[in-house]
Image (cartoon, rainbow, N blue to C red):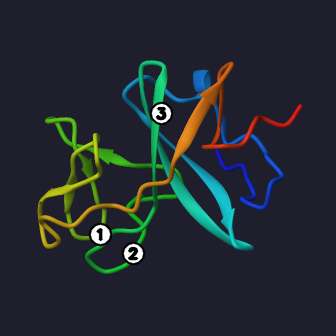
Amino acid sequence: MRTSLNNDGESTLLARLEQIEDGGFAEAEARFDGTPESVILHRDGAAVRAWLNVCPHAGRRLDWAPGKFLKSKDGLLVCAVHGASFELQRGQCVAGPCRGDCLRAVPVEVHDGAVVLAGQAPAT
């Protein structure tokens, strides 16, 4: 799933909560200062966390194919390129070449099942 959102006051749906498997990931596209960026969405029940889809080790995308992310048996997000593993609370790298670094968080909110950037109401 790839949708877009602008941070210039115009809101577009990133995802519907029910489109993200509980405990799973989805990808969306958001525009920051006019530049499109890939964003990882992770659902944990009714909450969603988000990060830029960029590994701090080498600046590469974490997905192995667009919108397809690896999750370890321990529940960590795994970079498909170098195997760095990230915990899902703060996006901190706990194993691999960038241990101690963090993914860049993207603040999101859920409003009536719509996932949007924090501070923006869903478009109606």
Q: Quadrant of the C terminus?
A: top right
Instruction: Compute the Cα span from label 1 to label 3.
Output: 24 Å
- Residue shown at the point (47%, 33%) measured from the top left: 48
Q: Tell whether 122 sits left or right of 102.
A: right
Q: Are the two marked residues, 1 and 3, in contact with CB atoms closer than 8 angstroms?
A: no
Circle 1 Cα neighbour tier, 10 Å, few/some/many (<14 / 14–19 / ≥20)? some
Rate crowding at label 3 as few (under 14), some (14 to 19) or many (20 or more) other CA atoms within 10 Å: many
- Whole-Å distance between the Cαs marked 3 and 2? 23 Å
Q: Nearer the viewer, mark 1 or mark 3?
A: 3
Q: Secondary structure at mark 1?
A: loop
Residue ranking furthest to the right:
124
Pointer 2 or 1: first along the chain: 2
Which residue is drawn at the image coordinates 29% and 51% (left, top)?
91
Q: Which residue is at the front of the view, 18 or 120?
A: 120
Mark linked to residue 81: 1
Looking at the rendered structure, the kind of residue marked 1 is Val
**Disc number for residue 60:** 2
* Residue 48 circle label: 3
Q: Which of disc 3 and disc 1 is earlier in sequence?
A: 3
Please identify the quarter of the rendering in which residue 113 is found.
top right
